[in-house]
Image (cartoon, coloured by chain):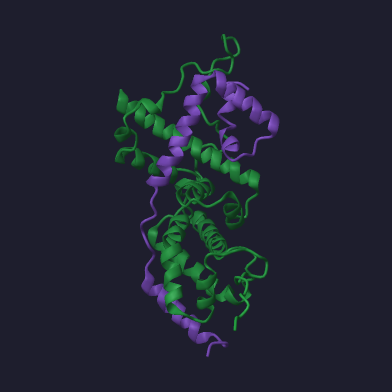
Amino acid sequence: MSTPTLPRTRIATGIDDPDAPLLARLRRGDEEAFLALVERYGPLMLRVALTHVRSRAIAEEVVQDAWLGVLDGLDGFQGRSTLKTWILRILVNRAKTRGVREARCVPFSSLAAPDDAAPAVDPDRFQGPGDRFPGGWVTFPRDWRTLPEEQLFARETFACATAAIRALPARQQEVIVLRDVQGWSSEEVCEALTLSEGNQRVLLHRARSRVRAAVEHHLEEAAA
Amino acid sequence: VTCRELVELVTAYFEGALPEEERAAFDEHLAVCPGCVRYVEQLRTTIRVVGDADRLGDSPEVGVLLGAFRDWKRARPTTG
């Protein structure tokens, strides 16, 4: 007697969501499943909320508010995206609303962010139109492969990168954290942040370029 | 492609989003320009540093969330 093997359960649209088992349990009101999701996505939600609001306390409120939105929306969630991108989209919407409301009262740093359209590298690093190689490097960048690994991957370097990320405009922070810290795909990031491929790439480019410049500055100072 | 232009194309290059011709021009430039090879390498290293740097660490307060979850569960018409 053999039972036919059932195909793996998939959400209607065919998205293979690694959180599908947790989602099913959550829908049944399983507290453990809820806690597992909070543990999995809570830190990320808090981190992203903090790009929009000033204080940890308000970020906590935004995260709570987002979870309420998730629970209330659960019955309507169709699985057209993965659970994690859906959760993050709710979080970002709440954080933005809260951030805008706050900004009306108090100006805060990430709105007064550095020029968004600034080039990846300081234009002075390149030769001018009258020079021998217009648009070429004046001096080549340093070869980081010649630096000792313990200097390159030192705690100070990480601290410098973290500080540089936190100084970025909110949207750039979201993209670089999701892509390069969390390792999400560009499709997932576009879905969660409601961005086009092209916009996502521009934000990632500006974010990475600025962090590279900060790390370079740090390493040059350390070498001097 | 000049060096100044190349530094603006690196992300699109990494993402495989450059049109065929631009990708070829990018590769040709890298083949003859040690400065840009270093720059591209610096960006690769930056991505690696970022991956290890901005650890998320902090978790939100679970207590309040759990309370909210229980309220939600109680209020649900469908739960048995």
Q: Quadrant of residue A147?
A: top left
* Residue drawn 59% across the image and 84% down it: A1
Up-down relation of residue A150 to residue A189 (above or below)? above
Residue placed most toward the observer, A220 or B34: B34
* Residue drawn 63% across the image and 45% down it: A199
* Residue drawn 45% across the image and 46% down it: A109
* Residue drawn 53% across the image and 23% down it: A123
Residue B7 position within the rendered picture, expressed as x and y whole percent measured from the top left:
55, 28
Up-down relation of residue B23 to residue A177 (above or below)? above
Can the viewer see residue B35 in this picture? yes
For the colour purple, the matching chain is: B
**Which residue of the protein is positioned furthest toward the bottom in this rendering?**
B80
Q: Quadrant of residue B26?
A: top right
Up-down relation of residue B21 to residue A3 (above or below)? above
How many labels sit on residues?
0
Describe residue A195's horizontal placement relative to residue A60 as left or right.
right
For the colour green, the matching chain is: A
Can the viewer see residue A164 in this picture? no
